[in-house]
Image (spheres, rainbow, N blue to C red):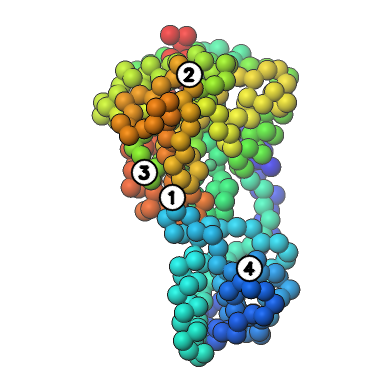
Amino acid sequence: MGGVGGGRSVPDDGLAERRLTFGGRDRPALAHPCHRCRLAHFGPPATGAVWLTSANPNAEEAADCLAVLHEARATPSGWPQPGRLRGEWTTPVFRIAPSEAEALRALLEEESGTRIRVQLTARTGRGIPKTVVATLPGQDHSDYFIFCAHGDSDSGGPGADDNASGVAIVLEISRAWSAAVRAGLIPSPALDIRFISWGSEIRSTRQYVERMSGEEPRLRGVINFDQSGFGSWRDALFAEPDDVPVNSRIIGIIRDLAIEHLGQPGFPERFATTKSQGGTDSYVFQSERIMAEGIVPSLTVYTSAWSSLNPLPVTPGFPPVNWYEDEEEGMVTVDGDAFYHSAGDTPENTTDREPWNMGWCARLGLLTARRFIDGG
Ligand SMILES: [Zn+2]
């Protein structure tokens, strides 16, 4: 769980680590079809061999192998999804895409002497996620507003879009806002602004809310960023949820601002709000079970959600702004990220290709919070 504290990170409790290095040794690959099941895997695993399997490998069976190549489900981009393995593992497991597994199988069927070279430097251990909280002091400390993003890559992939993009936006808003206050360009905000990178998505957020419950000052609102740096099929900005009554004012503000700035440099040409999709930190602040003193306005601002295009019914009164002409009446299609939760969610594949997405989120997020706080 993530620890919390104003302007500091909670120290790690010490990471027990072990390094496993397999330095490019050649080993024969197994090419005997397995008779135990009808899955197209090769086995049974043998000492010192590389085991190619499409079934979930188990640690005991693989114990004497040099490595396991596990055929995983692919994302729409073709990259395999990382995943969790059961049991205690000492054998390295490489997840490979179906297209790679197919090519390997063809090779193994052709000739029995195929050799595979694997190379891995891995670090394993136990640690605690760290939540970092920084505060821009307001004129009045009795209330505060939160900008946040989950700082972990919850899938185990590199997580450039999900969710280094969100953390980058929170950092940029905090940098720009505090610099403007320091330079005397704008007065200090009316209330405290907390900038938070969650150690562990949803879990750390829940813990934070539980800790602050019953405490002064009072939380006035939240803007969260998640998958805010890339979208594979559309070029638009999204904010949600627009179907939760407590959000009506903040949703109205971000919609007005999107319309006021439509197509201007640094702002999107297309904008939509959507109904609740869940699955991200802003929803913790709208859980009646967790928020003992009542739920608060809380938005997630983003440029893609999940891994594919997702058509949703438009919430009455909240039509998308300047939307695509081929959209079905009454629907709005949310963009996805073809690299979602995969090993391919790297800056080269996602955030570096559309860095303006983070700029849109930072500008509209900051303007929305300022108008919301000032009551304008
Ligand atoms: Zn995320």
Query: Which dot, 2 or 3, sits closer to the camera?
Result: 2
Q: Which residue is mark 2?
A: 316
- Quarter of the image for the C terminus: give it: top left
Horizontal and vertical percent position of residue 27: 55, 85
From mark 4 to mark 1, how far is it between C-alphas? 24 Å
- Residue for point 67% across, 74% down: 37
Q: Is residue 202 above or below residue 297?
A: below
Horizontal and vertical percent position of residue 324: 32, 32
**Residue 55: mark:** 4
**Residue 233: mark:** 3
- Residue for point 42% across, 55% down: 77
From mark 3 to mark 1, how far is it between C-alphas? 9 Å
Q: Nearer the viewer, residue 71 or 222?
A: 71
Query: Which dot, 4 or 1, sits closer to the camera?
Result: 4
Q: Nearer the viewer, residue 201 or 324?
A: 324
Q: Are marks 2 and 3 in contact (CB under 8 Å)?
A: no
